[in-house]
Image: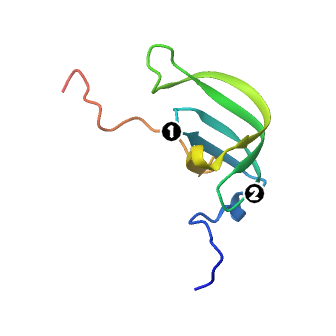
Amino acid sequence: MSGRKETVLDLAKFVDKGVQVKLTGGRQVTGTLKGYDQLLNLVLDEAVEYLRDPDDPLKTTDQTRRLGLIVCRGTAVMLVAPTDGTDEIANPFIQSDGA
């Protein structure tokens, strides 16, 4: 085993591709991954933040805010997911009123 630390994630395959990043505190950002380091600090270009619902801070709305080029600090990153190949589906666990 080498003395060099490696991240669990292999982000090299996501460089110059769209990613969705969820941060601690509930913020959610999408953008093009331009770079990263072993501490999971991320550089995103053309970043867009999805604003949260003022009534329920756990939910995001369709409102967005363009941020441009940003650095996401690795200690705040909770999730990194590709934007290509993902679709939003209906929640199968929500009970309908007719059931």
In the orientation shown, which residue stands out farthest toward the top?
A: 55
In the rendered image, residue 52, in percent from the top left (x then y), is placed at 54, 22
- Secondary structure at badge 1 equals loop
**Residue at 18% from the left image edge and 27% from the top image edge:** 99
Disc sitting over residue 63 in the figure:
none
**Residue at 59% from the left image edge and 48% from the top image edge:** 75
Q: Which residue in the protein does label 1 denote? A: 88
Q: Which residue in the protein does label 2 denote? A: 15
Q: Is disc 1 surrounded by few (<14), some (14 to 19) or many (20+) residues within 10 Å?
A: few
Q: How many marks?
A: 2
Answer above or below: position of 85 versus 12.
above
Q: Nearer the viewer, residue 67 or 83?
A: 67
* Labels 1 and 2: the sequence-earlier one: 2
Q: Nearer the viewer, residue 80 or 96?
A: 80
Q: Is residue 21 left or right of residue 17?
A: left
In the orientation shown, which residue stands out farthest toward the bottom?
A: 1
In the rendered image, residue 92, in percent from the top left (x then y), is placed at 33, 38
Q: Residue 67's image quarter?
A: top right
- Secondary structure at badge 2 equals loop
Q: Give the distance between the C-alpha atoms of the residues marked 1 and 2, in whole angstroms.
A: 23 Å
Q: Is disc 2 surrounded by few (<14), some (14 to 19) or many (20+) residues within 10 Å?
A: some
What amino acid does circle 1 point to? Glu
